[in-house]
Image (cartoon, grey):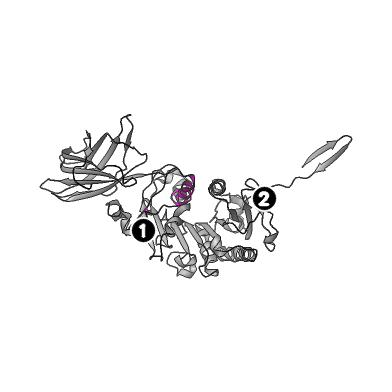
Amino acid sequence: SKILCFFCFCFLVIEEQCPEFTDLNLGHAFSGTELHVQLLLYTRKNRDCAERLIENNVTASEYLNTTKKIVFVIHGYRPTGSPPAWLGDMQRLLLSSEDINLIIVDWNRGATTVIYRNAVENCRKVAEILKNYIDQMLVGGASLDSLHLIGVSLGAHIAGFVGQKYKGKLGRITGLDPAGPSFTGEPPDHRLDPTDARFVDVIHSDIDALGFRKPLGTIDFYPNGGTDQPGCPKTLFSGLGYFKCDHQRSVFLFLASLKNWCDLITYPCDSYLDYKRGKCMDCDAFQPMSCPVVGYHADRWKKLLVPYSSPTTAYFDTSGKDPFCMYDYVLEIITWNKSTRRGFIKVKIMDNAGNTVESQMSSEASTFQQYESVKILTGFPRDIEKIVKMSLTFTTKSLIGPRRKLKVLQMKLKSVNNSKRPQLCRYDLTLVENTEVIFKPIPCLEKGT
């Protein structure tokens, strides 16, 4: 409120505050909260001040335009009661990417509790409330195909329950690490399912703890195999971040896809192990589409599927920092050691300016046998357009015994992200264990490589 004065007259002007996401605390979590849902609408006309939709009079909204796409963002379990840390970025980036109706579904009262099961039981109630809002939007001119529900953890299953109510005719559901506890092992009508929308894309980033392991969508993305995410704490001494970092990574990968700093390209594959062995780098088998990208633009891939294929799993690696870009290469090696060698290879690439980028080392040892080709997927957090030097380091990670040698008959390095770049080769190298060998690669001699 403020006082405005004109001449000898003063007026008290009461300014209406912008509706905000419910902010609770740990005390509310221990005492428990009764379910209350509010829908906060943002558009490009009211980016900085939400409009609270009226539950039984949605058409009275000043800003809702039912001729445009309607995107719902549904959060999950809130054990401490605070608003999600990612909420502001989600709002800003979604509205920057597309002219949409963005609706933040705030069910913090109902999600804030130390008893996880209570929050789970509220999920179907939230879905029923959302159906009431959506029904009014449909009467007001919206179409089911224009609806996109983005659900985080428990929110992913809420989105699935909404989709079930419309018999899978919603346009799209995005599940960001759907919750595993209380949902693993449940039948499809008790969780998110591929039939809940016309297109269901899911990012699994914590399948060994808080997330859901098995596929749930039209396409399921498993960054770094879906378990330990790079850059996340590895020990309990890191505090709360140890428990939530992997789980939240799905959200931050989705946000990264809205920043357009790089395409997070993924590779349809039967398993993460096959992906790491370089068996799934060529998307030609999936023509006429290219490799799918993860995140907001994943539906570009869907539009090329006519008709829809069976559910697809896709794998990709990321760096440990936002925007999580990774530039993939396939390293192919043929050795001529008479005896089998097992070990790891670290790769560095360099340009004329002296920039050097080091690859992530695979977590699984490769097996090198005489005259047999071994493919290793290797990724770099930064791209180098023109490689003038590179190095290989072979290690067995053994602390005892003699240093092994790996005799390389032929080495090839091929960019996965940019197929137009020349494939690089080197012939007749000897790698002594734990010793970096630097060399200048040359364009491969074979025709068609």
- Is residue 310 in the magenta section? no
Question: Residue at point 51% right, 64% down?
Answer: 160
Single out the residue that lies furthest toward the front: 447
Q: Which segment is the magenta one?
A: 244-266
* Residue 113 seen in render: no
Q: Which mark is residue 19?
A: 2
Pinpoint residue 294: horizontal percent, then vertical percent. Answer: 43, 52
Left or right: where does residue 252 sit relative to residue 5?
A: left
Crowding at dot 1, Cα within 10 Å, few <14 / some 14-19 / many 20+, comes out as few
Q: Nearer the viewer, mark 1 or mark 2?
A: 1
Amino acid found under the numbered disc labelled 1:
Pro
- Which tag, 1 or 2, sits closer to the chain's start? 2
Compared to 15, does 61 lie above or below? below
- Is residue 249 in the magenta section? yes
Left or right: where does residue 73 sit relative to residue 270?
A: right
Q: Which mark is residue 288?
A: 1
Pinpoint residue 25: horizontal percent, then vertical percent. Answer: 60, 49
User: How far separated are the C-alphas under marks 1 and 2?
Assistant: 46 Å
Left or right: where does residue 91 sit relative to residue 324?
A: right
Question: Residue at point 61% right, 53% down?
Answer: 28
Amino acid found under the numbered disc labelled 2:
Pro
Q: Nearer the viewer, residue 62 or 360?
A: 62
Pinpoint residue 443: horizontal percent, then vertical percent. Answer: 22, 39
Secondary structure mainly formed by the magenta segment: helix
Disc 1 is placed on an element classified as loop
